[in-house]
Amino acid sequence: MIDFHYETDFSLIDNTKYIDWINRIIASEEHLTGDINYIFCDDSYLLNINQQYLNHDTYTDIITFDYTDGKVISSDIYISVERVKENAVDFKVDFDVEMLRVMAHGLLHLAGYKDKSTEEVALMRSKEEEKLNCSTWNIKIMFDKEYDVIVVGGGHAGAEAAAAAANLGSKTLLVTMNLQTIGQMSCNPAMGGIAKGQIVREIDALGGYSGIISDKSAIQFKMLNKSKGPAMWSPRTQNDRMRFAEEWRLALERTPNCDFYQEMVSGLIIEGDKVCGVTTSLGIEIRSKSVVLTNGTFLNGLIHIGERQLGGGRAGEKAATGITEQLVDLGFESGRMKTGTPPRVDGRSLDYSKMIVQPGDVIPEKFSYTDTKSLAHQRDCFMTHTSTLVHDLLREGFDRSPMFNGRIKSLGPRYCPSIEDKINRFADKDKHQLFVEPEGWDTVEVYVNGFSTSLPEDVQFKALRSVVGFENVKFFRPGYAIEYDYFPPTQLKHTLETKLVNNLYFAGQINGTTGYEEAASQGLMAGINAHQKVKENEPLILNRDEAYIGVLIDDLITKGTEEPYRMFTSRAEYRTLLRQDNADIRLTPLGHKIGLASDSRLKRMEEKLKKSDAFVNFFRETSVVPEDINPILESVNSTPVKQSHKMFKSFSRPNVTMDHMRKLKSVSEFIEAENIDREVMEQTEIQVKYAGYIAKEKNNADKLQRLENIKIPEGFDYRQLKSLSYEAREKLEAIRPVTISQASRISGVSPSDISVLLVFMGR
């Protein structure tokens, strides 16, 4: 047993940090057994010990007493703290380092090492250095403080989690296996897309970094679905892969309170029902008040290329082990999922003249509501197609495909299938689109979007060379599939904290999602809520009518997922409210309230809202005469009017746009006088043309909120309600919904079951 005693006012900051190190020395020296007592004292106390027991008047830094019976069975080691301090100054080393040298010196004396002769002193010094140079201890000194939040993993979820927690004021440590791949785009070099673009804007509105990073590294911008209503408009950027990761790294390095460490986390420190830190593959313990796990595809990751299997979390990077096994031992349920990526090819070997050019928008926008710049020029993407010949060549390798020979047993993303899955499931299709996407401004590397595969590399190569424009293609690397561990997200609360272990949060693919944007949004919310809990603040939970992020998290924890989950606009019942253009109006006040969104963000949003409301009121209150409005109406084949009426009425008609209304003198004068920009004009047009739909959805959301306000008591025993169906009782016990509204969204819980709950709750 190791014990510490004090005969002086001095006390070590944290004795526990020394115990593991001392035990390692004891284990390495076979003569050390029994109890060891360290007594820390001042010079006068130690001199008194010298005089009393050793009969000399000498100041020393250490005296060792051992009580021997064959092997050491007990020992007292007296250390003068004053002398150690003086030594540290004389030797020009940290006090901690000198204290450790003296502590090691005492142990080595007990182990039989002497320091009388020149040879003995040299050997003692050598042994002291050996103990002091133990990398485990050196790093323990580096991590002698307790962090508020430790984030494990440096992907999109981890980067947002670390940024959020640190910006809110938590002492944050980002631990990742490779600091050079922070914010790495493991799959396609793009951000946003259908529903995903809305999520990026929401992250930005709350004060996250993804929108800013995307804008800074963009090489092309497109607003998708412009032919449809504004609820479907979705921004998307093509990005420079290397610049994207660089911008993330730089942004985090500029973030106060954010520390970094490169190593694999192999376990968690659990005390009672609470996480208290992490352990690394080197055996280092780093303590914290909360932990956010964002392990991506690295948990027991297994890469498949044809008949070959390689352990790894990404091409060229090893898998992470230990965490899954520990969590399962703690009672967590785990599963396996699959994702894949296509080959990367040399753009110099492609014939773009045979492909269809896919340019960016003529007037490109951007993701962030801050002052990031829109693109002045853009890089084109291209489109080509597979063919029946390509499909036949791919089928030749099906017998060696891990998807079809049983090696891959887990499910992949339904809405981003591999090329072999597409030609197998959609055998009636004679071609599939392939998008040829440059990986950056200057690189020749090209991403072949739509050709994700785990077929043998020779099959990939032969088939791709039969695609139009790819006749002379050269590979940079083949495509592959990867299987990895995940944890069904019904084991989480709305804050993304686990139900089994307090202060432990999951974010990203560990929760069964797929996509950078889904991961980043979860990381943001986990980082926010880890900080909020550590600081004893109220959590931030977004409702389904407030954000796509709210829909995402509610879907995960209420319904769970057995295949990689990705967001679509169709998943949101209030998508007219959750548009990409108003994410700042919806969420920036919430981000500002908790301290994440800056004052300048809030001021910019309030100015936009003020101007758009004023512009809408202008259209409501300003009349227009027939001779002014009829030419506009006739130009879009709309029925002319016979008398004056409010502009709002004409503007509400189909095909009448803001560009048409700006032809009216009073409108153009208002725009100039009030300094109305494009963003305000877009917001105004949507508010005018979709006023009825927006009002209806708000009304529906308000009705649902009544059920959201009916809380279910924590620990409620559903088994007592015999009127509930057996399936409902089983599902409610497993998921433990917080509100009646959440209970109503659980698969297997019927309206009659909800009625039973409402009656029991007295409603």
Image (cartoon, grey):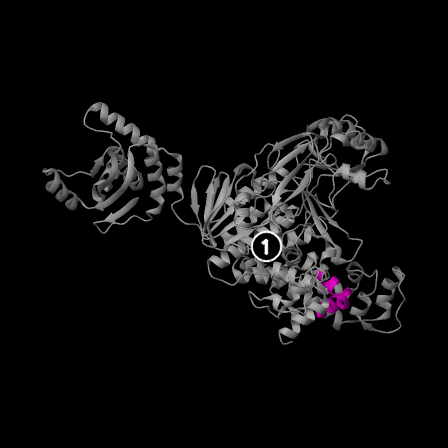
- In front of the other: 66 or 658: 66
What's the residue at 25%, 44% (across, down)?
37
- Label 1 Cα neighbours within 10 Å, binned few <14 / some 14-19 / many ≥20: many
Identity of the amino acid at label 1? Gln
Across and down, in percent, residue 737 comes to 61, 63
Left or right: 247, with 680 as reference point: left
SS state under label 1: helix
Per the image, the residue denoted by label 1 is 491
**Residue 202, quarter of the rendered image:** bottom right
**Residue 433, quarter of the rendered image:** top right
In the rendered view, tell whether residue 544 sits above or below residue 389.
below
In the rendered view, tell whether residue 462 sits above or below residue 753.
above
Residue most extreme to the bottom: 762
Across and down, in percent, residue 525 comes to 57, 55
Across and down, in percent, residue 721 comes to 64, 69
Residue 369, visible in the rendered structure: no
- In front of the other: 45 or 208: 45
Question: Would you say the magenta stretch is mainly helix, strand or loop?
Answer: helix
Region in magenta: 683-699
Q: Where the N terminus falls, by quadrant?
A: top left
In the rendered view, tell whether residue 744 sits above or below residue 69.
below
Left or right: 82, with 522 as reference point: left
Specify whether residue 268 is painted magenta. no
In the rendered view, tell whether residue 758 sits above or below residue 606.
below
